[in-house]
Structures are given as C-alpha cells and as structure tokens.
Amino acid sequence: MDTAANPAPALRGGGQAVDFRGETHRTVLQRMGLTPELRRVETGGSPMRFVDERGRTLLHLPAEFAGGEIEVLRGDLAQVLYEHSRPHTKYIFGDSITRLTETPSGVRVDFQQGVSRDFDLVIGADGLHSNVRRLAFGPEEDYVSHLGYYAAT
Ligand SMILES: Cc1cc2nc3c(=O)[nH]c(=O)nc-3n(C[C@H](O)[C@H](O)[C@H](O)COP(=O)(O)OP(=O)(O)OC[C@H]3O[C@@H](n4cnc5c(N)ncnc54)[C@H](O)[C@@H]3O)c2cc1C
C-alpha cells in the first residue's frame, strides 16, 4: 500500500516484534517511564533448541538471544507510546506530509489535506520506505542499499 497516498485513519496495530536489549535501551525506557508498561505487554520470548534426527541438541539459543531483554509486539509498543504521550502530544491521523521547506526559524511542513504548519524540528519515524526521508533527501534508491541474504548449503 502507498502509505503516503493512503495515510492511516487511526493508530496502526500489527507488525512483528521489537526487541530492547543492553544498557542504552534500558536507560531510555527508564527515563521515558515505560519499563513497567512494556513489562506488562512483553511477549516473554521463548528459548530455541535445534536438534538432529535423533533428538540430540545441536544448538540451544536462550530466549534473550532472539527476544532481547524485553520483546514487545510492534502494535503493543505503538499503543503504549501513544497512550503515554497523548496528554502532551497532538496526533494527526489520515494525513501525510507532501513538502518540507527549511526556513530561518525551523521547517515549514505542507500536509496532504492542504494545511501548512511551522515546526522547530521534523523527525522522520515513518518506517522503512520513509516519506519524510524521501522528501528531505530524494528517492530512496539514492541512499538505501538493498542487501541480499545468501544461505550456504
Ligand atoms: C517479519 C519481521 C520480523 C521482525 N522481528 C523483529 C524482532 O524479533 N525484533 C526486533 O527488534 N525487530 C523485528 N522486526 C523489525 C521491527 O518490527 C521494525 O524494526 C520496527 O517495527 C521499525 O519501527 P519503525 O517505527 O521504524 O517503523 P514502523 O513500525 O513501520 O512504523 C512506521 C509508522 O509510520 C507510519 N507511516 C508510514 N508512512 C507514512 C506516511 N507517508 N504518512 C504518515 N504516516 C506514515 C506507518 O503507518 C507506521 O505507523 C521484524 C520485522 C519483520 C518484518
């Protein structure tokens, strides 16, 4: 789906897991006051065991290896961040950015629905094929490298 042409009318759920691990992640979550809420919705992860044809363990991966210290489904994380920030954040759904223009005092942002607004700072957090990055830096082919994965047999 072209997200820029069809912006979501409400908070989007769904998606896969997001992992948090290590001191930096821990500190950020603590400073944001999110750790208890994320603990409530974390997946818990599960350890993995690779076995041969006789059931003998070849490799054991602890839960933290795949799931980090806290693993949360993307939709749950979005919901927690949304609820947490709602009292002091204005959310606009069903709209998308069409143009960014740097001004002496910040950035003028034109929206699809026809409104223009001035901001001190614009942060692009709109995923892999980011509309904001495209508007700021040009077509993603110019700066995203597409890596292939090869499995040795
Ligand atoms: C199969 C799979 C398994 C994964 N497993 C793991 C895992 O185990 N651990 C892990 O840490 N990560 C995992 N990931 C990766 C993880 O899900 C992503 O890294 C993470 O969701 C990226 O977050 P994000 O906020 O950058 O982007 P997104 O979660 O994609 O959020 C971007 C948001 O921007 C909005 N948006 C997009 N375009 C526009 C627009 N033009 N206008 C307005 N809004 C827009 C979207 O609606 C969306 O809400 C997995 C991913 C996949 C696909």
Image (cartoon, rainbow, N blue to C red):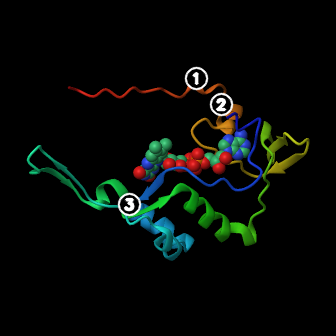
* Residues marked 1 and 2 touching at CB (< 8 Å): yes
Answer above or below: position of 101 versus 51: above
Disc 2 marks which residue?
A: 137
Instruction: Give coordinates of residue 145: x percent, y percent.
Output: 48, 26
Left or right: residue 43 versus residue 124 is left
Say which amino acid is labelled 3. Answer: Arg
Q: Is residue 78 left or right of residue 100?
A: left
Q: In terms of secondary structure, where does tag 3 sit? A: loop
Q: Nearer the viewer, residue 116 or 86?
A: 86
The residue located at (90%, 45%) in the rendering is 115
Comes first in the chain, label 1 or label 2 = 2
**Mark 1 = which residue?**
142
Instruction: Give the Cα separation between the discs numbered 3 and 1.
Output: 31 Å
Extreme residue in the bottom direction: 36
* Residue on which disc 3 sits: 21
**Residue at the outermost top position:** 142
- Estimate the spatial distance between the alpha carbons at disc 1 and disc 2, rounded to whole Å: 8 Å
Q: Is residue 101 visible to the viewer in this orientation of the structure?
A: no
